[in-house]
Image (tube, helix red, strand yellow):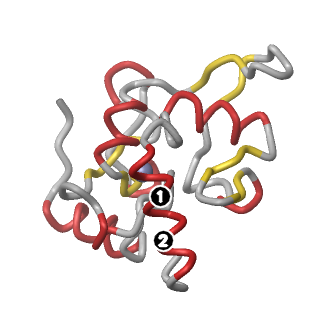
Amino acid sequence: MTRVSPQIRHAVLDRANGRCEYCRRPLRYGISRFHVDHIIPVERHLGSNDIGNLACACINCNSSKSSDIASYDADTRLLTPLYHPRLQQWNDHFVLVDGLITGITAIGRVTIRILQMNASQYDIELRQYLVELGLW
Ligand SMILES: [Zn+2]
């Protein structure tokens, strides 16, 4: 278990503008507090505690991602890294379509599958509702 200081944790959550940096769930509509994710896990993949390796993640994304950093894309069959919130832009890899997060690149597709971003009907309906209210 790798810990980050309370100051770094606060900076990570503040930088995320109140959203999970993977599924974009707004913090205020989360079912639990947000987590600080090591994008590249420290022990298994030689990541660091540097703020450039940290991301704000909802419990669903954080627990599904675990120590994964890549997987095989179902379309290309190529080993593909997961989305990296510090190095990439969300809109370059994902699009929201009627509540479903849809991958528009191999990175997006792999990340959606590994993080199970569309596994919960509740999450899909929450996104639809937030879009309708202009809160997405
Ligand atoms: Zn999330």
Q: Amino acid at mark 2?
A: Tyr
Residue drawn 65% across the image and 30% down it = 110
Q: Is residue 131 above or below residue 97?
A: below
Task: Tell me where residue 38 appears, x and y as whole percent.
Answer: 37, 41
| SS at circle 1 | helix
Residue drawn 62% across the image and 51% down it = 100
Q: Amino acid at mark 1?
A: Glu
Q: Residues within 10 Å of mark 2 (few under 14, many from 20)?
A: some
Mark 2 and 1 residues: CB-CB less than 8 Å, in contact? yes
Residue drawn 36% across the image and 73% down it = 18
Looking at the rendered image, the quarter that the N terminus falls into is: top left
- The answer to whether mark 2 is within 8 Å of ligand 1 is no
Q: Which residue is situated farthest in the bottom direction here?
A: 134
Observer-nearest of 112 and 40: 112
* 126 on left or right of 136: left
Task: Tell me where residue 92 appears, x and y as whole percent.
Answer: 77, 57
Q: Residues within 10 Å of mark 1 (few under 14, many from 20)?
A: some
Q: Separation of disc 2 and disc 1 at Cα? A: 6 Å
* 14 on left or right of 46: left
Q: Which residue is mark 1?
A: 125
Q: Which residue is mark 2?
A: 129
Q: Is residue 85 above or below residue 7?
A: above
| SS at circle 2 | helix
Task: Tell me where residue 87 appears, x and y as whole percent.
Answer: 63, 54
Please tell me in which quadrant of the rendered image residue 28 appears: bottom left
Task: Tell me where residue 10 appears, x and y as whole percent.
Answer: 23, 69
Residue drawn 48% across the image and 35% down it = 115
Query: Which label belongs to residue 52?
Result: none
